[in-house]
């Protein structure tokens, strides 16, 4: 299910540090916890990515650059996440 508006989120590693993605798509650490909005932390038990998305690169005023991840949570939920300009977003929930 693609969400009508992405939900703001944070992703942390096992030590509690924010996971960041470099311009070259290097992941600072394995994602271990996800917090959506002001909700409770959820344990990430599996993940894949990043997959780069470079939209409208030929039109600088409209260009967007993101990296997408799929994550599986301990409760069985699977999500599509994106990180853009350092901000994590939940874009979709898998059935």
Image (cartoon, rainbow, N blue to C red):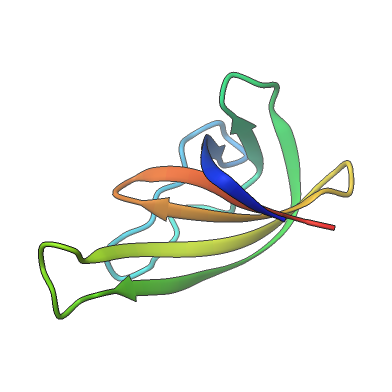
**85 left or right of 39 in image:** left
- Percent coordinates x, y for residue 9 in the rendering: 53, 36
Instruction: Please tell me which residue lies in front, 44 or 2.
Output: 2
Q: Residue furthest right?
A: 76
**85 left or right of 92 in image:** left
Quarter of the picture containing the N terminus is: bottom right
**Residue 71, above or below 43:** below
**3 left or right of 73 in image:** left
- Percent coordinates x, y for residue 88 in the rendering: 46, 44
Q: Residue furthest front?
A: 4
Q: Residue at x 62, y 39 (%)?
A: 14
Q: Residue at x 21, y 66 (%)?
A: 63
Q: Residue at x 31, y 74 (%)?
A: 54
Splitting the image into 4 quarters, where does residue 53 fall? Answer: bottom left
Instruction: Please tell me which residue lies in front, 56 or 26.
Output: 56
How many marks the image carries: the answer is 0
Instruction: Please tell me which residue lies in front, 6 or 33.
Output: 6
Q: Residue furthest left?
A: 60
Q: Residue furthest bottom?
A: 58
Splitting the image into 4 quarters, where does residue 36 fall? Answer: top right
- Percent coordinates x, y for residue 4 in the rendering: 57, 46
Quarter of the picture containing the C terminus is: bottom right
**Residue 75, above or below 67:** above
**Residue 9, above or below 70:** above
- Percent coordinates x, y for residue 71 in the rendering: 69, 56
């Amino acid at each position: 299910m693609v969400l009508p508006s992405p939900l703001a989120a944070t992703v942390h590693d096992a030590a509690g540090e924010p996971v960041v993605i470099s311009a070259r798509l290097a992941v600072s650490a394995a994602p271990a916890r996800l917090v959506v909005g002001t909700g409770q932390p959820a344990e990430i038990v599996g993940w894949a990515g990043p997959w780069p998305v470079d939209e409208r690169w030929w039109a600088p005023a409209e260009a967007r650059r993101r990296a997408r991840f799929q994550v599986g949570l301990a409760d069985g939920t699977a999500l599509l996440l994106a990180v853009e300009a350092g901000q994590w977003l939940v874009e979709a929930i898998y059935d």
